[in-house]
Amino acid sequence: MFEAAELGHKIDKPTYKKEEPKLRQALLDAQYELKDNGKFPVVILISGVEGAGKGETVNLLSEWIDPRLIETHAFYPPSDEESERPPMWRFWRSLPPKGKIGILFGSWYTMPIVNRVNGATKTAELDQSIEQINRFEKMLTDEGVLLIKIWFHLSKDQQKKRLKSLQKDPKTAWRVSDYDWELFEKYDKFKKWSEHTLRESSTGEAPWLVVEGADPEYRALTVGNYLLQNIRNRLDRENIKRQANAAPLLAPIDGVQILDRLDMTQKLPKKKYERDLEHWQGRLNLLSREKKFKEHSVVTVFEGNDAAGKGGSIRRVTSALDARTYNIIPVAAPTQEELAQPYLWRFWRQLPRKGHVTILDRSWYGRVLVERVEGYCSEFDWMRAYSEINDFEEQMVYNGIVVVKFWLAISKEEQLRRFKEREKIGYKRFKITEEDWRNRDKWDKYVTAVSDMVERTSTSLAPWTLIEANDKYHARIKVLKTLANSIEAAL
Amino acid sequence: MFEAAELGHKIDKPTYKKEEPKLRQALLDAQYELKDNGKFPVVILISGVEGAGKGETVNLLSEWIDPRLIETHAFYPPSDEESERPPMWRFWRSLPPKGKIGILFGSWYTMPIVNRVNGATKTAELDQSIEQINRFEKMLTDEGVLLIKIWFHLSKDQQKKRLKSLQKDPKTAWRVSDYDWELFEKYDKFKKWSEHTLRESSTGEAPWLVVEGADPEYRALTVGNYLLQNIRNRLDRENIKRQANAAPLLAPIDGVQILDRLDMTQKLPKKKYERDLEHWQGRLNLLSREKKFKEHSVVTVFEGNDAAGKGGSIRRVTSALDARTYNIIPVAAPTQEELAQPYLWRFWRQLPRKGHVTILDRSWYGRVLVERVEGYCSEFDWMRAYSEINDFEEQMVYNGIVVVKFWLAISKEEQLRRFKEREKIGYKRFKITEEDWRNRDKWDKYVTAVSDMVERTSTSLAPWTLIEANDKYHARIKVLKTLANSIEAAL
């Protein structure tokens, strides 16, 4: 992949002087159209060999185009807030909103390559990382992100020359650290694993552009034109609605859905409930105070039919916890800032630090439930959501987060009874809205959506627990018990 | 202040059972009105003696009212991201948006009191902290925040009893740490300095409510009713537009404004400019790479007439810096999330970590410039902004942030020339809009606003530098030189 970037590409100064103003103007125009259009963000990954002009190119771009519409993010050793979350968290928090350009200096490729070069990982692990990256990038591009990946390359000779010349000039000597020379010693290894990584991660949606970094004029025009071409192409093309390749899953031919198998008659007498409540709340409380708990965090998702008792169950959980350690996230319509980001962004930003519990009252599953049923997103969008969600949860679990997901199920009759009851009791009135009645009309569609969801996202890492919630006592105890046992298993 | 909270207040269970559902319903109603109204946030500070039921009360509130509209924040030892910013940063990032209730468990009062009790500070320093807090809280309440401050108190005997009884019960023993007993040893000191602090910080806008914490029913009803009364009061009252007590500053009687004193004829020949540019960019670059720089950060504000060359000056600064270390914040209309917060919130969230430079293309000074001139905010609002801004900048400077503020001034004639030129050159066209022409019509009003701003916010900690910008070369060099010298002085 690097041969074409070792040809000694060069642009002479007069040509550059002629081309530069035209390119600059076209880039500015494109940038302003991007802003006005406001439909997609541009993410530029800047990677490659040290000394190949990454910094200069970013500086130049900032001079050419309107720096107010660019964000540059560089990645140092993670802060403690970052290291307490999954590794991708820091990149999620650096994504630019729609209409803006974000330059990521160093990226999700850095650590996988560095670790392989240093021998900290095996090839199989590198390939696993690449596979995860590919899935992540597919999600980004499916979400409409224009992802531009630029690799700055220098041949071994060029790099040596470059480092030496930087070192000689007192104005640039600071840029060359011992670490750069250490890296240079490993040039061949770096080249090998970089090439491997680039090859495996150059996809149709987000190919790599490898740029020879030796000649400033050549690399500047190359990067500028590539950026221009990509933004223009996206701005000019017709917005074709994408369609999922596969049809939605078949409902079971015999008509038996997973929810049908629940024994909705399960009941707990009040006396037993009170004893169990005390037991499991005590258990949960003790667990949350164990030393080991400080190395984990908990994300628990409450989904369920309207009026299934999510709120009541959540309160039985929270009253077992120290108010300082949990946060309840009610998931409603996204804000303006959230709408300008990929779908999962607003959940990434809510991930707890170690030792904390995040309770989601509704969640990212909205995409495959209400958004699917109501047609708020396209089939293409909700069909891909299952695997995106699985990837998301996998990252959480691998980072020591205990993920516990509840579906609180009630029967259609029980729901009706509760709706009517709620309309009568003063302080419960707020819980019942017109929307609840409308949702009820789509009961069957929700049953299908829930069955698909459970089938496709109940994984060994983050299984769904279905809660028979016609009896509130039974439901609450099962929630508490499941949560406590899941945390215990993780500790 | 604590006598009335040592009377052994008690509510009997039957009364509580009768009152609780009514209170709960009224609170829920108020909470929903607050949400629908969406005009102000509620911030509840929970402070006081250990064992006085702070946690239980917060848990109870979460049960009573809709937890989806509450955020609870507790404050542990600061994270590294927090400790690299001014101490108030962590509280700013925990403020609830309009329409929501935020419970701050521990608050800006904790450290000043603890430090005084431990002898780490003197009384004068405690009083300084209280003075700063009062100014901060005044700003919050002026911004429309409903600030409710609750202090949970126990007499010495009560606290001892309470800690012992918590310790005896295996379910609550965990709550009592050695640290709590250590604190208990210092009960009298704590009481003394807490009382001092409460007395000095109980203002008309945000008085303290001291609650006797011994009886669960009493403290629950007291806190609940106080909360209800406050929210209701704010919801029900007519929204009276507040007026500043003082009239705006007089323009100088002789008509001479500070901007008139600038020698706008200053010029730099191109040759000299190029030499100076290299010199000062080199200087800036070297400074930014000094070891000591990693313990500081830089916030630099660019304000100026339209077309005064802010963008060009910013680029001369950034091209001297490593793209990884700076961020340019273009200040335009606030987002939805920003509008739901006090005015300065969106600037607090942008404060850099150590070793970083934040460049603001326009800034918080918009409030006393465009917002004042265009009437986007009331006189009451911009009149108080000067001291709020001074407080903000003081906090930055005390935390090792180098604050450098530029006003780029051009003459009215020069502006006209540049507007016309911009309209001709393609890639500069985006820089000139209808709004620029409209602003130009208000030239004199801006002169007054700028003069007031400089007079009232040019402090020894964060002085304004006025840049004569009719000659771009002169302007850019003066910016670079001032910035480099300011950083050097700080290191």
Image (cartoon, coloured by chain):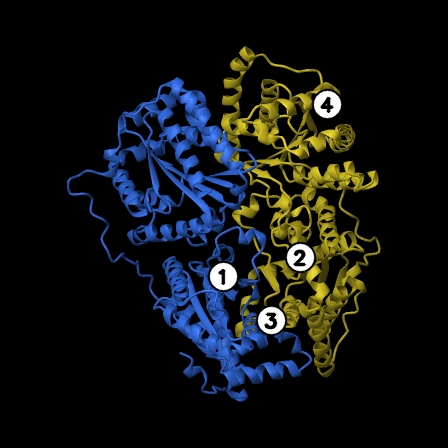
Chain colours: A yellow, B blue
Q: Is residue B432 visible?
A: no
User: Mark 1 sits on what residue?
Assistant: B100
**What's under tag 1, amino acid-wise?**
Lys
Asked if one can make out residue B299 in the rendered structure from this viewpoint, the answer is yes
Question: What is the distance, in whole Å, between disc 4 and disc 2 at their CAs?
Answer: 64 Å
Q: Chain of mark 1?
A: B
- Bin the neighbour count of mark 2 within 10 Å (Cα to Cα): few under 14, some 14-19, many 20 and up: few
Q: Position of residue B371 (x, y in %)?
A: 34, 45
Looking at the rendered image, the disc whose residue lies closer to the viewer, 3 or 4, is 4
Q: Is residue B421 left or right of residue B191?
A: left
Which amino acid type is shown beneath numbered disc 2? Lys
Question: Picture coordinates of residue A295 (x, y %)?
Answer: 70, 59
**On the rendered structure, is B300 left or right of A53?**
left
Question: Is tag 3's residue or tag 4's residue first in the polypeptide sequence?
Answer: 4
Residue B38 x, y percent position in the rendering: 45, 58
Query: Of circles 4 and 1, which is in front?
Result: 4
Q: Which of these two is toward me, A67 or B401?
A: B401
Tell me the SS state at disc 1. loop
Chain for mark 3?
A
Q: Amino acid at mark 3?
A: Lys
Res. A156 mark? 4
> Which image quadrant: the N terminus of chain B?
bottom left
Give the residue at mark 3: A420
Q: Earlier along the polypeptide chain: callout 3 or callout 2?
A: 3
